[in-house]
Image (cartoon, coloured by chain):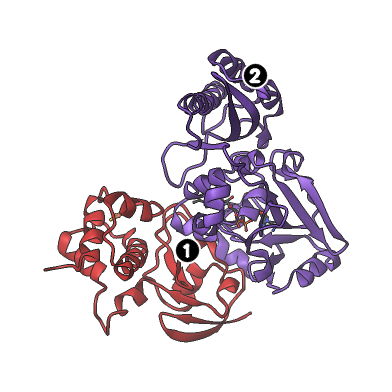
Amino acid sequence: MRGTRAAARTEVFSPHSLEAAVQLLAEVKEPVRILAGGTDLMVEVETGRSELPGLVLDISRIRDLRFVDEGDEGAIHIGPLVTFADVRRSALLREKAPALWQAAGLVGGEQIRNAATLGGNIMNASPAADGIPPLLAAETHVVLTSSEGSRRIPLFSFFKGYRTTVAKPEELLTEIVLQPLAEGAHAYFRKVAPRRAQAISKVVFAGRIHVARDGAAAVLKTARLGIGAVAPHALRLFETERLLGAQVLTPRLIEDAVRTLRSEIAPIDDVRSTADYRRAVAGNMLRAFLMAGLTRSESGKAGF
Amino acid sequence: MRIAMTVNGGAVELDVPPFKRLLDVLREDLDLTGTKEGCGEGECGACTVLLDGEPLCACLVPVARCDGGEVVTVEGIMGSRGPDAMHPLQASMARLGASQCGICIPGMVVMGAHFVDAARREGRVPTEEEVRSAIAGNICRCTGYVKIVDAVLDAVQGGEV
Ligand SMILES: Cc1cc2nc3c(=O)[nH]c(=O)nc-3n(C[C@H](O)[C@H](O)[C@H](O)COP(=O)(O)OP(=O)(O)OC[C@H]3O[C@@H](n4cnc5c(N)ncnc54)[C@H](O)[C@@H]3O)c2cc1C
Ligand code: FES
Ligand code: FES
């Protein structure tokens, strides 16, 4: 009922072009809330966590912001209005960004996946967002656009703190650019939550590793790891990646990596879980991922 | 704001605040009270409607987004096979006793009918697991889901034989 009464004084502007949208953001003096799928914003307003906005910029009618393309340079370009249902329908993402594809299938229920956008998932900047760790492991850049032009920022430096980003109020997220999974590399995604559907992650982890065989040894050429719900914002695990880079993959190295990961994260106790549980589970996820990499490479098979 | 949309096949034009939830517009302005409010936060699925053919939570949709769109509510599922004719899923649910208190049922019917229609179009019998995952966004506190899942599978396979 709160929604009904309060909605009376909110104006909604629904442009069809990006130019009109950034123009509005440049010109208006009052605060504007950007609306994509609405699955975070509407809940914030309904629960009173967010004040009802006076002006809403509904970007959902900007057709040019909903695309999945393979660029000439091999990178994958995704429009911010691509929904998690769109991600699931994309054969390109299923093959070249399998962790993101898997994550998309575990977001909400079908009603939520039909509305929730990847851009909204990033901009909402929840530490527990399921779309973000797979993007971190895919070395993603995001493009922010205002009436002044565009800038490109690596996703790992995009988040500043709990639900805050470096984006300015007059900027829109307009493109998500990720690297395709390399030939012979393995991808991993795991979310731990109280139930399978419609649940917020206690820990969410994604990774990519490239293991090459050198005689009897399995050499880990590269590791790219992203994690959520274990710090004020999602993290790329650079220290753990460095420890693993260009090393012979052994059970001992794996245990060192698990220890490094556990000291690199900063989980807290909250309503959903405890810091100890999160630290334990995060380490177990990395171990499971690397052990699988070791086993696959021993049996000489590529791909999970 | 003037909103023009199609609701259950009929053209509707009304003057409503643009940020008003579709859920409230349906119930208060259009007197379509089949669509229920459970949580108001996207969690329960009681407010499920189709917008341009896709199931969404009407509690999360500001009505401005429906301008020019096509909305189907549980009332529209009822008439979709001829006047006063039940959708095969509704018939299966009634026959198999898949409803108890009823608060989740309108959302379940919209979601389930959408799923049944898609499966029938593809001429494919889904697994129980697929049915459960299709209705994962619809919470039922009464039935334990077993009879609802049975009814969906029954409706896909043509209902009563
Ligand atoms: C029942 C339920 C279940 C959920 N389950 C999950 C889950 O399992 N996993 C998960 O990760 N999330 C989940 N969510 C959260 C939510 O659905 C996602 O975060 C979703 O991706 C948000 O996208 P949206 O388009 O709906 O965002 P909106 O609500 O439209 O926007 C979110 C925020 O981002 C801003 N924004 C959106 N797009 C842009 C843009 N292009 N440029 C600048 N700013 C922008 C908005 O101003 C707003 O602050 C769930 C939500 C609900 C209600
Ligand atoms: S009332 Fe909309 S999902 Fe519960
Ligand atoms: S029948 Fe009561 S909640 Fe489903």
SS of the residue under disc 2 = helix
Q: Is A98 on the left or on the right of A261, as rendered?
A: left
Real-space Cα separation, disc 1 to disc 2, in angstroms: 42 Å
Q: Check disc 2 and give the amino acid type.
A: Thr
Measuring from the top left, give residue B113's x and y in whole percent.
32, 67
Is disc 1 in contact with disc 2, using a CB cutoff of under 8 Å?
A: no
Front label number (1 vs 2): 2
Asked if A304 appears above or below A75 in the picture, the reply is: above
Measuring from the top left, give residue B87's x and y in whole percent.
26, 73
Asked if A126 appears above or below A251 in the picture, the reply is: below
Residue visible at 50% across and 62% down? B59
Return the residue nearer the eye: A20 or A52: A20
Q: Which residue is mark 2?
A: A260
Q: Which residue is mark 1?
A: B56
Question: Is residue A62 visible from the viewing direction of this image?
Answer: no
Q: Colour of chain B?
A: red
Measuring from the top left, give residue A22's x and y in whole percent.
79, 66
Residue visible at 71% across and 66% down? A57
Q: Specify few, some or many for label 1: CA neighbours under 10 Å numbering under 14, 14-19, or 20 or more.
A: many
Q: Specify few, some or many for label 2: CA neighbours under 10 Å numbering under 14, 14-19, or 20 or more.
A: some
The numbered disc on residue B104 is: none
Q: Colour of chain A?
A: purple
Residue A172 found in image quarter: bottom right
Residue visible at 28% across and 67% down? B123
Check the image and name the residue furthest to the right.
Answer: A148
In the rendered structure, the residue with mark 1 lies on which chain?
Answer: B
Question: Is residue B161 visible from the viewing direction of this image?
Answer: yes
